Amino acid sequence: KAGVTQTPRYLIKTRGQQVTLSCSPISGHRSVSWYQQTPGQGLQFLFEYFSETQRNKGNFPGRFSGRQFSNSRSEMNVSTLELGDSALYLCASSSGTSLDTQYFGPGTRLTVL
Amino acid sequence: AQSVSQHNHHVILSEAASLELGCNYSYGGTVNLFWYVQYPGQHLQLLLKYFSGDPLVKGIKGFEAEFIKSKFSFNLRKPSVQWSDTAEYFCAVKGNNRLAFGKGNQVVVIP
């Protein structure tokens, strides 16, 4: 089974721009979660999508948004980029049940200049 | 909301030494606990998990962890480390379909 894939792997943007990141989950998985990883804050939960609906949301500003498509692929969008948004953005896929395990992709490294 | 604390963020040890990483969690519901590992240049991988049953769980590469409910702990152990165990280790607790991670332990094994 193919693992979780994320595109692009690296992105460089400037302040004020917006960016869209993509995640393709493991085949058969219906839940996609997004996390932000930074040296200072560690791994923080952004949101989770299940069957095209946002089921959970972390404590991030509204500039961070996402969506999920009918094939379970998910996109994350960050608008009006700030320097502090520089991070590794990780996507995790799972079956979406209460006893599931999340499997992570390689991440997208976003640098905001 | 759930939270996790990990101690001794930087650990340096020699090959064949024993490793123990502490993890304490806070969560009022049924706990699902995980240890993930991130090797240099690689993505986050599952080491082991605990959902229920035997509190001593075994994972990949000789790692094991013990769930102690009374101490809200889920410590990771390996009796004899190898150079290839150099990595960052994260403890996580799952609740409300989200994972809360600790800050991680950066482990360096010297050959």
Image: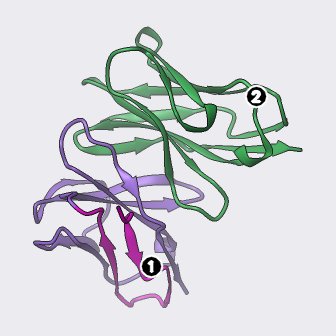
Q: Which residues are magenta?
A: A1-27
- Measuring from the top left, give residue A78's x and y in whole percent: 33, 78
In this rendering, position of residue B41 left or right of residue B17: left
Q: Which mark is residue B80?
A: 2
Report the Cα–Cα distance between label 2 and label 1: 44 Å
Q: Find out whether the residues at labels 2 and 1 contact each other: C-beta distance under 8 Å.
A: no
In terms of depth relative to the viewer, which is nearer, A37 or B19? B19
Q: Secondary structure at mark 2?
A: loop
Quadrant the C terminus of chain A occupies? bottom right
Q: Quadrant of residue A90?
A: bottom left
The residue positioned 43% from the left and 64% from the top of the image is A105
Quadrant the N terminus of chain A occupies? bottom left
In this rendering, position of residue A32 left or right of residue B24: left
B35 part of magenta stretch: no
Dot 2 falls on which chain? B
Q: Residues within 10 Å of mark 1 (few under 14, many from 20)?
A: some
Q: Residues within 10 Å of mark 2 (few under 14, many from 20)?
A: some
Q: Quadrant of residue A104?
A: bottom left
Q: Quadrant of residue B51?
A: top left
Q: In green, which chain?
A: B
- Measuring from the top left, give residue B58's x and y in whole percent: 51, 26
- Measuring from the top left, give residue B101's x and y in whole percent: 45, 43
Please state which of the two labelled residues, at mark 2 or mark 1, is closer to the viewer: 2
| Farthest residue, direction front | A1
Q: In purple, which chain?
A: A
Q: Is residue B93 above or below residue A3?
A: above
Q: Which residue is mark 1?
A: A82
In terms of depth relative to the viewer, which is nearer, A10 or A103? A103
Q: Secondary structure at mark 1?
A: loop
- Looking at the rendered structure, the kind of residue marked 1 is Glu
